[in-house]
Amino acid sequence: MSQPRRISRRRARTALVLPALLCALAACSAAPEAGGSTDAAGPARDASPTPTGPPGTLFDDFDYTGADDPSFAAHGWEVRTTGGGPGIKDTWSADGAAFSADPTAEGGKVLRLRSSTDGTKQGTTQVEVQTTSRNFFTGTFAARVHFSDEPASGRDGDHVVQTFFPISPSDSSENYSELDFEYLPNGGWGSVGPQLDNVSWYKADPPDRVHNTLKRRLEGWHTLMITAMDGKVVYSLDGKKLFTSSGKYVPRDRMDIHFSNWFIDLPFAGGPRTWDMKVDWVYYKADETVSPADLRKTVADFRTTGTAYVDTVPKP
């Protein structure tokens, strides 16, 4: 029913992202090399200024060449490499983030989050991609996400958690806020799974939250939506409402947006295995309730006009 809270969420940009951003700011003319974090061809795009578009809107279809693409950092993203939890503490790595061609993606490419383990802490890496600014509060959050029921390679059975969530930058915030989608194909914390947990938080420590669990296998692509408006939070999966929280279990502070793929624990040895989670696109509309139909139309319009990225969300 959702992870124990993180030990620390203080963040530092990855070694891949910082040099790329500094290069872009210095008007570096050479394109960065494509490394192991991407299988896409072609040079990295120049970091572009914030485009015009519908007011109060973020849309990103993750059309990047890699975590070292200057546009990735310029568009407000980073890969977590700091310590702490959840899951296997201090195993966060940039190696698991890549931007891959995928014929099942609406835009033809995905953000792939790959976590790996051999059953030991030393042989484990977890991955999280997050925004670098806390511009998100009330409104509609959405993402098209591919959940995995089995590992991409190796033995099945790990207690893996595939997630999409906005969260306060600090666990100790007086107005702590967190809204979770968490998919556990093999369960965890005593549950056998598969299950999708939705969790609305009021406090991280001691934990104070409400939640709902959908017991269903969800291998494949899904549209996840969170609408936080008018004193309530509504979670939807593929246009169907799953859970509503209200009262004190609503956002009270600005948040950043995260995607992560991590292990609750290490239940067995037995050789290396890898788990993939994929993200096609992410969307946010400030201070408005967007219907599933309007969301589909908006994303389709972005596709039709060739719009890969928009950010007109007001900065705090």
Image (cartoon, grey):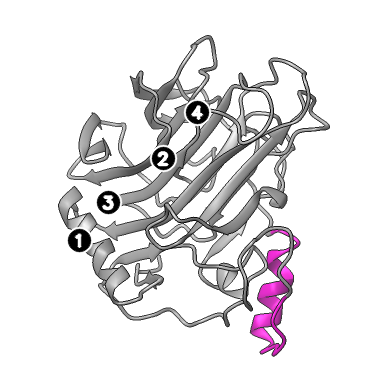
Asked which secondary structure carries label 2, the reply is loop
The amino acid beneath tag 2 is Ser
Residue 60 pos. (x, y %) = 42, 64
Queried whether the magenta region covers residue 191, the answer comes back as no
Q: Which of marks 2 and 3 is nearer the N terminus?
A: 3
Q: Earlier in the sequence, mark 3 or mark 1?
A: 3
Give the residue displayed 44% in from the left and 42% down from the top: 146
Q: Which of marks 3 and 4 is nearer the N terminus?
A: 3
Q: Is residue 302 above or below residue 223?
A: below
Label 1: how many Cα within 10 Å (few below 14, some 14–19, many 20+): few
Asked which secondary structure carries label 3, the reply is strand
Q: Earlier in the sequence, mark 1 or mark 4?
A: 4
Among the 4 quarters of the image, the one containing residue 246: top left
Looking at the rendering, the stretch of residues picked out in magenta corresponds to 14-32
Mark seen at residue 7: none
> Which quadrant of the rendered structure holds the N terminus?
top left
Task: Report which residue position mark 4 lands on.
Answer: 149
Mark in front: 1 vs 4: 4
Q: Which of marks 1 and 2 is nearer the N terminus?
A: 2
Mark in front: 1 vs 2: 1
The amino acid beneath tag 1 is Lys
Mark seen at residue 177: 2
**Label 4 – label 2 distance at C-alpha:** 29 Å
**Label 3 – label 1 distance at C-alpha:** 15 Å
Give yes or no for contact between labels 1 and 4 (Cβ–Cβ under 8 Å): no
Task: Report which residue position mark 3 lands on.
Answer: 140
The amino acid beneath tag 4 is Asp
